[in-house]
Image (tube, rainbow, N blue to C red):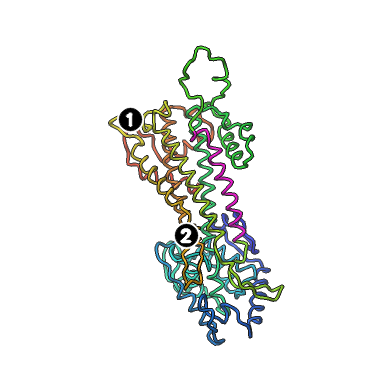
Amino acid sequence: MLTFNGTLSIEDFYKVIIENKPISIDTTVLETVEKSFNFLKEFSENKVIYGVNTGFGPMAQYKIKDSERIRLQYNLIRSHASGTGQPIPPMYVKAAMLARLNTLSLGHSGVHKSVIELMTELINRDITPLIYEHGGVGASGDLVQLAHLALVLIGEGEVFYKGERLATKDVFNAEGLKPISVELREGLALMNGTSVMTGIGIVNTIYTRRLLDWMISCSAAINEIVKAYDDHLSLELNESKKHVGQRKIAEAMREHLKDSKLTRKREHHLYSKNEDVSVFKEKVQEYYSLRCVPQILGPVLDSLNSIEKILIEEVNSANDNPIVNVDKKHVYHGGNFHGDYVSLEMDKLKIVTTKATMLAERQLNYLLNTRLNDILPPFVNLGELGLNFGMQGVQFTATSTTAENQMLSNPMYVHSIPNNNDNQDIVSMGTNAALITKKVIENAFEVLAIELITVVQAIEYLNVQDQVSTNTRKIYNDIRKIVPAFKEDITMYPYVNKVKELIMNS
């Protein structure tokens, strides 16, 4: 069980979101939240506090009667639960809930402690609110998406529970749960924030790191089976450049290939006089998609590390409005809900993921084009040329999917559209950015799945199963459990989807 104390790491998200570890709330968190709530309740008497005794957004000029304060919060939640499109998958919603729980636990929001307690129960019991993809502009945070979370917390709306989509009230009755106590500003505090875009973003980074690990392994395996020279992966060459990511990628590839019997030393083959040679039959250097992997995937790794840092800073920050400060005994109005930090990082992540997809597509093309590799039949066709097609058909899928990623990589960060009667006159589109990045990552896994099947078919054709490295042999064995060696043409889509599932979930 993860003891929740108001500070989260990527590892904590992994434990809760991927491994389904339960959480418990440290007593100090509840004490902090209660102090914040009591202070705001007292402080807001006879003062104008946005979202407590005023309307919202451009209607903040309207003062709300004390007798209408609670109704105001319910009105906000219900009116803004207006999302459309496809439901966000439960895993990503759970990440958003964890992120929201964390920021509300910092004591800067003035919420009733029942919010913390009920959100904890929902996470632990795998009850995830129905939240739609469309609706957030990412300026007052994820207003629309978080309204759907708040709707569930007041006992309304719908949830996913035990694989079914059900009415919240029915699930609460079955589980013996009670809605939160709306006392002061629980509606606004739940809705004003960046937690949906950040939660999705963190899951995106988890999958991107997994994708990158597979791409490193796949790139190493291709270098190996074509008997590439290994000096482009050498410590000496890569240490001559200062980028940490490049060095780490080269190191990982060297580790992958450490017991390979196929990679070659340049000094064994080319570092002699070669007096009788005027034209070398074999390439002196490999194509860039093989030789420049550290330089191409290095920026992906460096960017991923930086993106993770920014997202965790956002998770561990107060990102609603206004901000309650118990120590200073004051309430500060501002714009911590604005999602530009997350939006920009998601655009970065989808750009580097698309570049990695492009690398995989070019490596695939190298294997399929016999004029480039000089050792494999066209389309790694193990059957009868002309009659059989090998990997020819599935290359179209890889190409079109890569093209889609290239199009999707246009930035959302600069696509602000004013709205809300121009109160929100410049917005982040952060949740859109995070969801598009999610799609880009899933696409990348599809292209990589096709490449991995091709690598395994190439190993089969070359009959080098006993010469490849231990790590490549494991990949070969794992893929072969799903995809049989085929000479006759087979229907490919079930196998591509199974390999995609394998590499996404391993």
Residue 428 disc label: none
Report the span colored magenta.
288-314
45 relative position to 202: left or right: right
**Residue drawn at x 54%, y 64% as measured from the top left:** 97
Nearer the viewer's eye, disc 2 or disc 1?
2
Circle 2 sits in a helix, a strand or a loop, which is it? Answer: loop
Q: Position of residue 429 (x, y in %)?
A: 49, 61
91 is within the stretch colored magenta: no
Locate residue 238, reporting x and y percent.
61, 35
**At which x and y percent is residue 458?**
42, 31
Q: Is residue 407 above or below residue 40?
A: above
Q: What is the quadrant of the N terminus in the image?
A: bottom right
State whether the magenta stretch is mostly helix, strand or loop.
helix
Q: Which mark is residue 383?
A: 1
The alpha-carbon separation of the residues under discs 2 and 1 comes to: 50 Å
Q: Nearer the viewer, residue 424 or 371?
A: 424
Badge 2 crowding class, 10 Å Cα cut-off, few under 14, some 14 to 19, many 20 or more, is some
Residue 179 position (above or below residue 162): below
> Which residue, given by chain and number where applicable, does mark 2 sit on?
415
Up-down relation of residue 438 to residue 363 (above or below): below
Q: Nearer the viewer, residue 7 or 402?
A: 402
